[in-house]
Amino acid sequence: MPDWNDLRYFLAIAREGTLAGAARGLEVDASTVGRRLAALEEELGSKLFDRTPAGLVLTDAGRGIHSAVEQMEAAALAVERRASGEDARLEGVVRITLTEAFAVDIVLPRFAPFRERHPGIEVQFLTDYGALDLARREADLAIRLTRPQGDTLLARKVGEIAIAPYASEAYLERRGAPEPARGFAGHDVIGYADAAAKWPEARWLAEAASGARVSVRCNSLLSVVAATVAGMGVGVMPCLCGDREPGLRRVAPLVASLRRDIWLVVHPDLQHNARVRATLHFLTELIHRERPLLSGEGRPAVRSSGRRSS
């Protein structure tokens, strides 16, 4: 019977398409992945992958076992989750997946009291724009800005994020306040690159700022904020980022169509885990306390001065 660890390596290779990619996910070196694959192929007496210019591709034999091995993984993960779900100890690791901006601007600056209250819980913040799979225990809970599809996860709305255009005081002094009604004509804006070009902010900017010039393009929110702070143009960002920067000012009202809901998400099997519950409770209270910042209350937009832009 094949070693389950070898089968885990098989799945990682199938998902990543390379030994190096599988090694990164498994936190081992590529040579170890290669040895495991060779051992599994020898055990089964079949070649499981073909090497192609695009990477490792499943052979007919590999495709034949792939679904069954995925079912084995799902069963093993279910056992692990259900066992963890009954853990009443306030100690151990909790892995949270969230965006980097939300971690940096909202959670981490306010997280010290949790550590004082629960010193036995080690929290790992996984900041990535990709959605980690809670069912596969890639994370224990998530802070997401879209509600998960389907009914396999528990999701609770805990707040909203408002979004608006901002510019630096230095930019406004130099160029004057833009006029949204004129499509930000004559002004510079911070555009989007790569995957960020598909964000709702990018689509809104293309329509609302049709009269503007793109001064620079960025592929992350923190880069957009940095470029805006540097005075390179008008940047669209959550108020949780813009209102925290003392040198930035809103240059238009909140954009209702860009508002995001904040969801706390957990797998049902972990909802009774003591350390996960403690973390969820703290995050819920934290987000509720920061509602004014998140929802953009209290800072009006700069009025256009009618000053000519150059």
Image: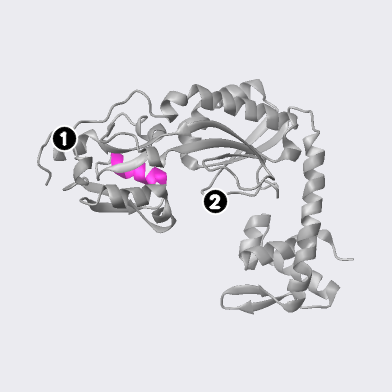
Up/down of 146 relative to 245, above or below:
below
Three-letter code for the amino acid on which mark 1 is drawn: Glu
Q: Quadrant of residue 294?
A: top left
Q: Quadrant of residue 124?
A: top right
Residue designated by label 2: 130
Residue lying at the far right of the rendered structure:
1
Residue designated by label 1: 173
Q: Quadrant of residue 17?
A: bottom right
Q: Residue at x 29, y 51 (%)?
A: 207
Q: Residue at x 23, y 41 (%)?
A: 180
Up/down of 16 relative to 274, above or below:
below
Q: Residue 275 shows which numbered tag?
A: none
Label 1, label 2: how far apart the Cα atoms are: 38 Å
- Residue 69 location, x and y as percent? 78, 62
Is label 2 in a helix, a strand or a loop? Answer: loop
Q: Residues within 10 Å of mark 1 (few under 14, many from 20)?
A: few
Decide if residue 229 is on the left or right side of residue 106: left
